[in-house]
Amino acid sequence: MIRTLKKTISLISSVVPKRNKRVVVYSLWRHGNTEIFYNEVVDSYPNLEIKRFSKNELFGLNHKSLKNLLFFYTARFIVTSHGPCEFKSPTQIHISVFHGVPLKRIGLISPEMVPGKFPSNYINKNIDYHVVSSFLSGALFSSSWNIPERKMLYFGEPILDEITKVINKNKRSKEQILYCPTWRKDDSYIVSFMKHAESRPKILWTVSPHPADFAKCEKIVTQANLKNVTLHKGGSLDIIHEFEHVYIDISSIFYYLIFAGATITIFFPDKDNYLQEFGSLFSKFEIFGFPEGSTTHTIRSEQSETLKKLFFADYSGGASSKIADFISNFYLKS
């Protein structure tokens, strides 16, 4: 039903006249690049009509969501942070501000999600411009998603600008470690981590799950009832700058931890299952120096600094303003 609804939205939208200064900021959850972008530009760019919608606010099938759909139909620009906007019309311009870099093949661009099409065709059809923070991250997106270089906007990410503001503030003690796993289909990863936390009682652990997995993780953490484990709700990006040491699996958070210069432990108690589930684009992890057959690998802060120079040598900040300026001036160039 959702697929049919999205096709219907796209068809209707293609015949509705567009307003060139109207912008939809669409995201699955209110956090990350789109949330920061919206908050920074909604009041400082009065020439733009900007509204943000979550999935429920657009597809809720109530009076408010129908009003939101009308705004969506007439908007020229769509800004998203979680991959292609498959229900945009050919007359709309989609700007993708994806979080991090494509360290894994996610379900959103999996061939199984788009019957009869390759992911690159699907992405190219639905992304008009793709915002990246460096030429290296642009090359990774280009090679893994087959996005042409002409679609890349080297503006940086709003998230990086936020991290820059707080990178040296409110650091917690070295005895405190953050664990922020990506979304997973089952709960084996959090069960394995709780056993790991129990075996290291002197460490004070904070678990910050993916927003889509919070309820699942909350149940397991509560049942384990470990005194040295607390649960954080609100997204890892809110607090990663507070920790000197962070546990992750292969998720976009890795990219931001490099930027923050943190010590990073890649925690893979079920590495084989993880790779089967996600199909990592860096399955051998050479870029991280991940030992073959290992389930845990730590990248020290000095190594993070080396990777930071590699990934962010050309980062200059001001991403939200650059995106808004691009939208504001788009039709002045034509």
Image: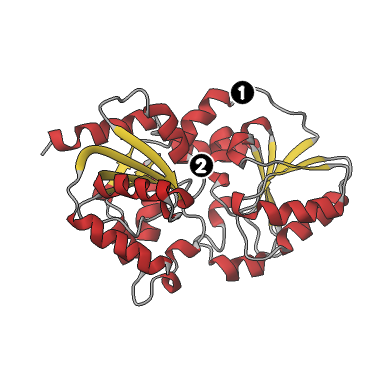
Q: Position of residue 228 (x, y in %)?
A: 85, 42
Q: Which of the 4 image quarters holds residue 332?
A: top left
Q: Secondary structure at mark 1?
A: loop
Q: Residue furthest front?
A: 63
Q: Position of residue 211 (x, y in %)?
A: 60, 49
Quarter the N terminus occupies: bottom left
Observer-nearest residue: 74 or 263?
A: 74
Please tell me how crowded label 2 is: few (under 14), some (14-19), or many (20+) other residues with Cα within 10 Å: some
Residue type marked 1: Asn
Q: Secondary structure at mark 2?
A: loop
Which of label 2 and label 1 is nearer to you? 2
Between the residue at mark 2 and the residue at mark 1, the CA separation in whole angstroms equals 25 Å
Residue type marked 2: Arg
Q: Which of the 4 image quarters holds residue 156?
A: top left
Q: Which residue is mark 2?
A: 30
Q: Which residue is mark 1?
A: 168
Q: Position of residue 57 (x, y in %)?
A: 45, 48
Q: Are marks 2 and 1 in contact (CB under 8 Å)?
A: no
Q: Residue at x 42, y 65 (%)?
A: 2
Q: Residue at x 53, y 36 (%)?
A: 259
Is any atom of residue 124 visible in this view?
A: no
Q: Position of residue 173 (x, y in %)?
A: 77, 29
Q: Identify the mark nearer the N-term, 2 or 1.
A: 2
Numbered marks: total: 2
Is any atom of residue 272 visible in this view?
A: yes
Q: Residue furthest left?
A: 334
